[in-house]
Image (spheres, rainbow, N blue to C red):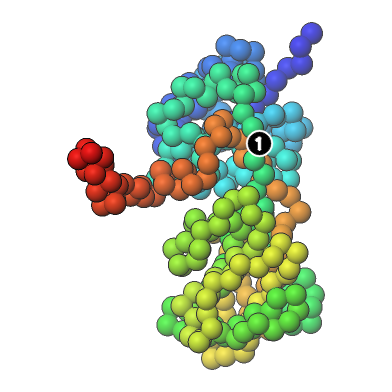
Amino acid sequence: MPTRRYVTVTLHGGRPEAVSAAAGFIDGMTTHGITSLVKGEHLEALGAAGDVEELLPDNEQRSELAVVFGGDGSILRAAEWALPLDIPVLGVNLGHVGFLAELESHQAGSLISHVVERNYTVEERMTIDTVVTDAAGAQMWQSFAINEVSLEKLARERMIEVLVRVDGRALSRWGTDGVLMSTPTGSTAYAFSANGPVLWPDIDALLLVPLSAHALFSRPLVIGPHSTISIEVLPSDESKAVVWCDGRRSTDIAEGMVVTARVGTHRLRLARISERPFVDRLVRKFALPVEGWRGVAERGRQHAD
């Protein structure tokens, strides 16, 4: 008797197109004898779509794949659950840029056969583990990030003073709006908006990006995967700050506290249906102009010949 198969289905609950796409996918899974696990909050909308069970701690590890209908925010929410379980995540983009997603909404029709036949590969992405300690070195908070850990000022009108260390050695002191510590995956997210470089996702490295720092040396830095970054909040007129992980989990920071980041224990597993190179994904997502005046001129010369 064949082993019963399960997939987890998550979605952006506030979007009718996400509910519709997820219901169609669940119907396809049911046709092929695959049970879909969904969170309790989505049971009412998706319970009648086919063979559906509520996602619970006693059945979540049975899932072979998590399929997400939504944008990158929805994928990050699903990844919070999937990461410690080492379950691959496959995103269907219903948002805007959607760098983490594998398929666009108009390609969702091909998804069912790929999942049924397990016709996909799994790509691993680096994550960040972060710890916040007080002035005495006692641990106050810990979390993880898929995109970035951001230390940001709380007061709009003031900067924070920070001392950045790499592997315990002082690097620079900045008066700044904040500091980002990003993964290569996050280099196309917040770090990109802060003028950081784009890193290819197969690179293992930490990206350090100051936010509007008042300093002569305040360039983004790419730091090796075996190094540790720590940022100490120094006393100032207004030294209160906040740490965010992926813009989803946060804790307040006071003077003397230290935020430490290193390569994470778990790696995000992204399911990929195609072997599309990252450069193609970059061009498509940002609509980069790959045919400029040089290409036009070259075609003109070819016609003349």
- Residue 193 position by quadrant: bottom left
Can the viewer see residue 259 in this picture? yes
Residue 250 pos. (x, y %):
60, 63
Quarter containing the C terminus: top left
- Report the front residue among 222 and 55: 222
Residue 236 pos. (x, y %):
57, 90
238 vs 269: above or below? below
Quarter containing the N terminus: top right
Residue 257 pos. (x, y %):
69, 79
**Residue pictured at 47% horizontal, 43% vertical:** 281
Where disc 1 sits, the SS reads strand
- Residue 166 position by quadrant: bottom right
**Residue pictured at 49% horizontal, 47% vertical:** 279
12 vs 115: above or below? below
- Report the front residue among 12 and 64: 64
Q: Residue furthest front?
A: 305
- The residue identified by callout 1 is 122
**Residue pictured at 53% horizontal, 17% vertical:** 27
Q: Residue furthest top?
A: 1
Residue 174 pos. (x, y %):
56, 84
